[in-house]
């Protein structure tokens, strides 16, 4: 009988402790979402600090560096075209703030947020349709300023019929080309488009590379993240080559 009482008391204590933890987390959840919003670094960190998985579908699952590296150092085999037109990601200027894009686009399909080298990075993504073909549009923000946009197509069969590479070149270069798997388009401000078709998916990225402040931050982030990779020898020389 005594053992049963001990077991019951222990169970009640555990339940009480779990209830308090749950109530405390829910209070922090409510407070953080109220003050900062759910799509914020603070809200994501709340889950991370409590060893919980992020409540959002991630837009990217790998390191942020791999999504900007092609602008820091151009792929040697990729051809570069120049354009007299200004490069812009849809109707969203590169100077647009995170709040403005969020207000315009609405609740995102996916979301990432992280702090790297004292710079806050947010990534939001939306599912869209283009001529009955699914695509994902992704917006990358550094310190709440829009710096990189990406259109990602994953339906290879339908992509072929769109001839996106030819459409891009015709729009910005006004010339006809054969299909190219990888290339850059650069405007007079040094803003860039990077097109890549690896046979499995197709990506079109737009980068605010013409803004010297943004370029400096991208350089800092690239250097910081590459330093963690032991496969890069003579890192300083390689980083210098990017510019």
Image (spheres, rainbow, N blue to C red):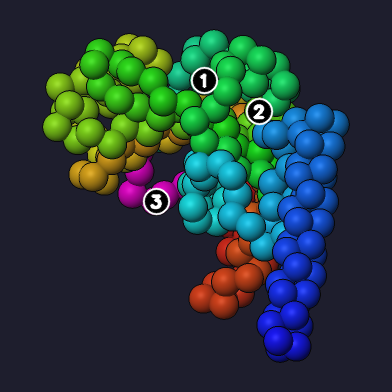
Q: Residues within 10 Å of mark 3 (few under 14, many from 20)?
A: few
Secondary structure under badge 2? Answer: strand
> Is label 1 in contact with label 3 (beta carbons under 8 Å)?
no
Which SS does the magenta portion mostly show?
A: loop
Disc nearer the start of the sequence (1/2): 1
Q: CA distance from mark 3 to mark 2?
A: 27 Å
Q: Which residue is mark 1?
A: 89
102 with respect to 108 (left or right): right
- Residue at 66% x, 15% y: name it: 103
Mark 1 and mark 2 in contact? Answer it, CB < 8 Å: yes
- Whole-percent x, y for residue 4 in the image: 69, 82
Q: Can see residue 220?
A: no
- Going 63% across and 32% down the picture, which residue do you hit? 147
- Seen in the picture, residue 62 relative to 233 is either above or below; the reply is above
Magenta highlight range = 74-79
Q: Name the residue tied to disc 3.
A: 76
Quadrant housing residue 158: top left
Instruction: Please rate how many residues cluster around mark 1, counting C-alpha atoms within 10 Å: few if below 14, some from 14 to 19, many from 20.
Output: many
Task: In the rendered structure, find residue 232 and report the number of the disc placed on it.
Answer: none
Between disc 1 and disc 3, whose residue precedes?
3
The number of numbered discs placed on residues in the rendered structure image is 3
Q: Is residue 78 magenta?
A: yes
Q: Quadrant of the N terminus?
A: bottom right
Q: Which residue is mark 2?
A: 146
Residue placed farthest to the front in the image? 1
């Amino acid at each position: 009988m005594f053992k049963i009482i001990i077991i019951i008391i222990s169970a009640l204590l555990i339940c009480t402790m779990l209830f308090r933890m749950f109530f405390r987390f829910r209070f922090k959840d409510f407070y953080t979402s109220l003050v900062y919003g759910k799509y914020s670094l603070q809200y994501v960190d709340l889950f991370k600090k409590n060893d919980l998985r992020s409540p959002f579908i991630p837009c990217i699952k790998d390191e942020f560096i791999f999504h900007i590296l092609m602008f820091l150092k151009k792929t040697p085999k990729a051809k570069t075209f120049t354009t007299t037109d200004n490069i812009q990601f849809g109707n969203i200027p590169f100077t647009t703030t995170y709040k403005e894009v969020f207000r315009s686009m609405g609740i995102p399909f996916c979301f990432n947020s992280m702090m790297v080298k004292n710079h806050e990075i947010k990534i939001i993504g939306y599912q869209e349709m283009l001529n009955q073909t699914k695509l994902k549009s992704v917006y990358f923000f550094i310190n709440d300023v829009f710096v990189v946009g990406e259109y990602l197509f994953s339906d290879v069969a339908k992509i072929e019929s769109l001839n996106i590479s030819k459409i891009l070149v015709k729009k910005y270069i006004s010339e006809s080309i054969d299909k190219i798997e990888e290339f850059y388009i650069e405007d007079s401000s040094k803003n860039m488009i990077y097109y890549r078709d690896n046979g499995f998916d197709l990506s079109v990225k737009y980068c605010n590379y013409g803004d010297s402040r943004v370029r400096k931050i991208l350089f800092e982030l690239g250097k910081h993240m590459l330093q963690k990779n032991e496969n890069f020898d003579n890192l300083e020389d390689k980083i210098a080559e990017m510019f």
